[in-house]
Image (cartoon, rainbow, N blue to C red):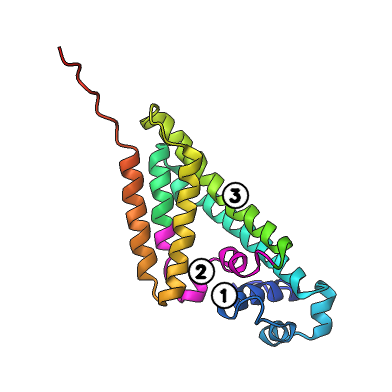
Amino acid sequence: MDAPTLSSRDRLLQAAMTLVRTKGYTATTVDDLCAATGLTKGAFFYHFKTKEDIFVAAAQRFGEDADALFRRAGYMDKADPLQRLLGYVDFRIELLQGEIAEITCVLGTLVQEVHITHPTIREVCDRHITANADLVTEMVVAAKRQHVPRARWSAEALGLYVQAVIQGSLLLVKARQSIEPAVECLRVLRRHLELQFLPTPVKETVK
């Protein structure tokens, strides 16, 4: 069965997501977007008023797709919330395959470049990056309650930390032009999470 034909708007959004990861926001022009899709400028401006508008929409689309992907992945079926959390990290490692431009984050790439100059784009990126951190935090809260209810660390801070490690590892991918640093970082992250949920030994009272 043939794949459904994408609308011109969807083709432009896909081109925006690809070009921002290969050229960056500033270097990408409306002409580049039209050339990548074979569409005219008339078609572009039918759907979007400005270059900023298309990247706002592209960030929104990428974020929505990512939100759905992570909330429907197989690890969410695990009964133990700690195994869901570890499964999430394993899934992030599995996604580190292919070309660098295919595995880096549109949201992270955009926000690094335009967080000062384009607050509207920054806000969309922040909303979806935060949504992913919130998903992790939900798993951390449940795992903490079940496994280490007396632990004094913050579940919210750990959820943000996981997101920071993931985004930082993708920055290393771009800097070193290799996926391996991200894989190693996420493996260390997984081990760190396992250690956080080890029961605290009960100290014996000296008689």
Residues at circles 2 and 1 in contact by the CB criterion of under 8 Å: yes
| Image quadrant where one finds the N terminus | bottom right
Q: Badge 3 local density, few (<14 within 10 Å), some, or many (20+)?
A: some
Q: Position of residue 21 (x, y in %)?
A: 57, 75
| Quarter holding residue 34 | bottom right
As drawn, the label of residue 202 is: none
Q: Secondary structure at mark 3?
A: helix
| Image quadrant where one finds the C terminus | top left
Lower position in the chain sequence, tag 3 or tag 1: 1
Look at the picture and state if 32 lies above or below 54.
Answer: below
Residue type at the position of mark 3: Ala
Q: CA distance from mark 2 to mark 3?
A: 18 Å
- The residue tagged 2 is 104
Q: Secondary structure at mark 1?
A: helix
- The residue tagged 3 is 131
Q: CA distance from mark 2 to mark 1?
A: 7 Å
Q: Badge 1 local density, few (<14 within 10 Å), some, or many (20+)?
A: many
The segment highlighted magenta reads: 92-116
Q: Position of residue 100 (x, y in %)?
A: 47, 75
Q: Position of residue 206 (x, y in %)?
A: 16, 16
- The residue tagged 1 is 21
Q: CA distance from mark 3 to mark 1?
A: 21 Å
Q: Position of residue 59 (x, y in %)?
A: 66, 64
Q: In the shown orientation, is residue 55 left or right of residue 189?
A: right
Identify which residue is drawn at 36% across, 45% down. 193
- Of 194 and 158, nearer the camera is 158
Identify which residue is drawn at 19% across, 20% down. 204
